Amino acid sequence: MVTAVETVKELAANAESQQELTDGFHLVIDALKLNGIETIYGVPGIPITDLGRLAQANGMRVISFRHEQNAGNAAAIAGFLTKKPGICLTVSAPGFLNGLTALAHATTNCWPMILISGSSEREVVDLMQGDYEEMDQLAIAKPLCKAAYRVLHAEDIGIGVARAIRAAVSGRPGGVYLDLPAKLFSQVLEASKGTESLVKVIDAAPAQIPGPDAVKRAIDVLKGAKKPLIILGKGAAYAQADAEVRTFVEKSGIPFLPMSMAKGLLPDNHPQSAGAARSTALLESDVVVLVGARLNWLLSHGKGKQWGPKGSKKFIQIDIEPKEMDSNIEIAAPLVGDIGSVLNELNKAIDGKWQAPPADWVKTINDKKEQNIAKMASKLGKNSSPMDFHSALGALKQVIKERPDAILVNEGANTLDLARGIIDMYKPRKRLDVGTWGVMGVGMGSAIAAAVETGLPVLAVEGDSAFGFSGMEVETICRYQLPVTIVIFNNNGIYRGIDKDPTGRDPGTTVFVPDARYDKMMEAFGGKGYYATSPDELKRMVDEAMNSKKPALINAVIDPEAGSESGNIGNLNPQSVVGKKKA
Ligand SMILES: CC(C)(COP(=O)(O)OP(=O)(O)OC[C@H]1O[C@@H](n2cnc3c(N)ncnc32)[C@H](O)[C@@H]1OP(=O)(O)O)[C@@H](O)C(=O)NCCC(=O)NCCSC(=O)C(=O)O
């Protein structure tokens, strides 16, 4: 007969022996935590459900979404905001595929992110025997990210996570895929062996200092400039070298132009900002210093009519990726290194012996800036009902002016293009938008990550179409009670709400249900819904919502006639030259 004392002894012995064991689930969590990663964005399911549960039980923040793409977008923006890889955790095949768009988006934008997906067993996948969610995920992920790894044995988890972290943040940051087959999670090993196998990544993104020759070359080019211009890209925002950026701009006295997500690195109302004189600055400058900005489509590849005649410009480019140089046009002075280190060297070189740019150049920029600002101001002040984009954005401009620490998330077509110019930003990394690819659907993921990572109030200004891509995440926002205020610019459709099917059979291709009540959607999950029909009402409601620090959605009714077809992607948005009339 077993006595009570013996039973207790047995339980104690079991407990002790259990403490000495670990498994794949625990090792993934231990490896992440050892490397200072405390948050996971994901969607639970087979085979990673217990990973999320255990991560939460072990003190990690686990934010469960309604769709993996939104979780991935959250992880991507978490990477941008923190310089640590944002983690997205998904189930196998379909969940993995849903996460891939965000992984590719992170890679394109050079933000560190790790997509961790469970996967089905190698033995069956490789023989294509029809396993549950069978797919060779590693092969599929490879071309879409910076690096991809698969871990097959629990004792290799530490190395796998370490490799993923270093690949994501070192050099030019990007997305990394980490494949964890289901069988791995339940592999058991002695706790001490497990702990020994973990790897702490030391100096994950080492400083890269440019050589003295490269610095001298750049300074020589800059000294010869009569109309210099600095362009700040989102790489400069990512670098968190805010003091170095400010010193370089202010010591050099050169006008600066922020790309969209670099707005606020220096305040938009800074006297040297050329943001409101963009075309003039690009066209007339003679030497351009690119700081973490690439000469891609957003800068018309550094050539063409926006930039003036061939040979009229010299470029100095600061980028951590040597291959970025000469991607579209000759770079006269490449500065390969991290932005903080490179600017530090430039700042030393110009210290105390720098001539401010010629006054007539500064005046040209300032005159154009004043003209554009005055033109804009005349459109912003109207208290019209229904609202147009300018009058509604005029109200939101004031909201951010009064709350410079709030984070602005922005996506859409007109809603994006006009908000970018109208809403001034005052602090670094407070504007999050669609990035290099112009992705619609990043809104709610970005808003959630911004609130989770910073604890700051978030204002998400969304086109009605853009919101639709991730709208179900309002439930996530309500579930986690995040301080997110969403404003939907509701003009009943994509660009505008007036398209018609010429045959009369169906709705026009770009229109939505008229006067849809997105505010009711928020109320369905316990958040506060508002319906705004004038700029004054909009301002009052946004103030109330943001002050409450609770989830809120304001349906801002915009004239369906307002808005135009996304003009800012130029020749990438071709219009049919045949057939339209007939239809
Ligand atoms: C390509 C761009 C970098 C550049 O566009 P531009 O139109 O040349 O410049 P901007 O929009 O920045 O500025 C337009 C003009 O406003 C001026 N400007 C800027 N700021 C101000 C302020 N504060 N006050 C007054 N005027 C201002 C600026 O100097 C320009 O005038 P001038 O100096 O007089 O020229 C940008 O448009 C961009 O980031 N676009 C991304 C679009 C995107 O990703 N869309 C998603 C697709 S949606 C989709 O899927 C779809 O539609 O389909």
Image: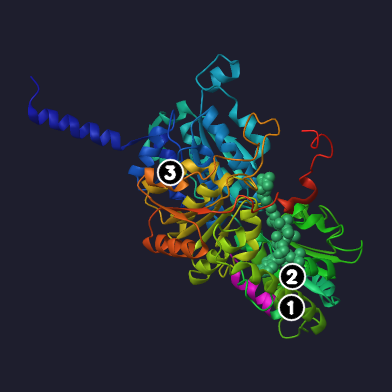
- Asked if marks 1 and 2 touch (Cβ < 8 Å), the reply is yes
Q: Which of 21 and 562 is in front in this view?
A: 562
Quarter of image, res 576: top right
Residue tagged 1: 366
Q: Quadrant of the C terminus?
A: top right
Residue under the image location 13 percent in, 28 percent down = 7
Mark 1 or mark 2: which comes first in sequence?
2
Label 1 secondary element: helix
Q: Mark 2 points at which residue?
A: 277
Residue found farthest to the top? 129
Quarter of the rendered image showing ligand 1: bottom right
Residue displayed at 49% across by 37% down: 67
Q: Is residue 342 visible?
A: no
380 and 452: which one is in front? 380
- Other-residue count near label 1 (Cα within 10 Å), few / some / many at <14 / 14–19 / ≥20: some
Residue 312 location, x and y as percent?
A: 90, 66
Note whether 404 is above or below 9 in the view shown: below
Three-letter code, disc 2: Ala
The magenta stretch is: 240-250
Q: Distance between the residues labelled 1 and 2?
A: 8 Å
